[in-house]
Amino acid sequence: MFQFLRGSSLDSATPDFAQHHNPFIRHIVRRTREFLENEIDPETGERYLKPVKVDLYGESDRDAVQLPPYLKDAYEVAEEFCELLGQRIKGSGFLKTLLLRRVGSTICAGMNTAKNMLGAWEDIEEEDDEATPEEKPKSLTPSERDLLEQFLDRLEANQEDDPKYEVVRRLLVEEGWLNEGCIIFSQYFDSIRWLADQLSRDLPKGEVIAIYAGGQKSGTLTDGVFVKKERESLKKSVRDGEIRLLLGTDAASEGLNLQRLGTLINLDLPWNPTRLEQRKGRIQRIGQLRDVVRIYNMRYKGSVEDRVHDLLSDRLEAIHQLFGQIPDVLEDVWVQVALGKIEEAKQTINAVPQKHPFEFKYHQVKKVPWESCATVLSASDRRQHLLQGW
């Protein structure tokens, strides 16, 4: 409702009307996780909600995954490609930044996207300086195609593993996250399947790796052998302690109760911030026996995700405490940074309110000039006014 009213004629006439008189704010009781975890129920003497704290890893600058030179070169070519495409296609931010979104997940996903673009996107002529830019979606000019081919050449000429894999392997095996039970999230199925294949090669013999995805892609991978399974079967196996490692796309970020698992790795950072909260909620939930769960957020050094992290790092915690989650409007920041529009990204961040609308409405005490009141309502009159619609 607040977003609907913004920009309307009502908003321009009374800029603070929605902020102070929004019916959602007037009639909704707001109970944050922090409040419920700290408030004592007078009937039971216990907290309303058992606190489950989060130890967050991967947040410092040194935790960003370092790219070897050939991958760094390939990433810079991908950035150049997206900027060139963005100058020609004025519409969808998603389409213009698709390659950077995918290569920000894993090198495998980035390569698959480049191959698909080269094979399926239509060739069009290069525009000269006086021509109207061609905004045809899913098309490539010769310059754009050349950059995609350079991107692939830099990756295919090297056989080194994606550096994210070594971080995942270290967390699971050397730091014991596998023993606590772990779910690993990615936005993309090919990233998940690539990681599962790598882990199946290096984890102890007989370790069952569950893959939870949309369609008919779910199943288990054991010693390199994949068996299709229903998602309900996988959930039951996790609950029963038969599976301690689950790799999932964002199909697993909603409706799953995975209190049995104690750790979570985000293989990539989704550009829609709400997804991170949904992922975290799979293990930080009622029924989690641990007092603390561990979460690792992965990003490549120098990537779009890394740059956005630098811009938001000093604001994210405050924004999260303010709203209880990260507003979806911050998805625009990722697109703006990917296209080199850093000042626009900063403006988007700075436009996020510094206070929650509830605070504007209720967290204040004003002196009432009672002497100026001409009429005092009787009890019946007060009731009648309170019963009136908004």
Image (cartoon, rainbow, N blue to C red):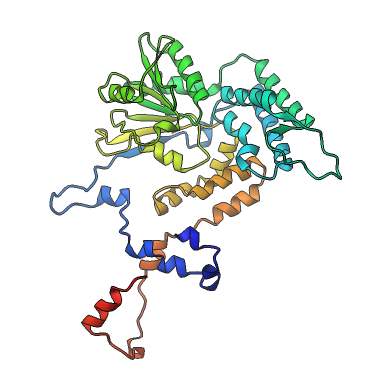
Give the residue at the far left of this rendering: 43
Relative height, residue 61 to residue 383 (above, below) = above
**Rendered residue at 30%/24% (across/down):** 238
Residue 119 visible within the image: yes
Of residues 250 and 133, the one drawn nearer to the viewer in this rendering: 133
Of residues 74 and 227, the one drawn nearer to the viewer in this rendering: 227
**Rendered residue at 65%/51% (across/down):** 343
Q: Position of residue 31 (x, y in %)?
A: 30, 54
**Rendered residue at 65%/22% (across/down):** 115
Question: Is residue 52 rendered to the left or right of residue 309?
Answer: left
**Rendered residue at 36%/85% (across/down):** 369
Q: Position of residue 371 (x, y in %)?
A: 33, 90
The quadrant of the image that shows the C terminus is bottom left
Question: Is residue 36 rendered to the left or right of residue 311?
Answer: left
The quadrant of the image that shows the N terminus is bottom left
Residue 354 visible within the image: no
Q: Position of residue 277 (x, y in %)?
A: 41, 41
Q: Position of residue 218 (x, y in %)?
A: 41, 22
Count of labels in the image = 0
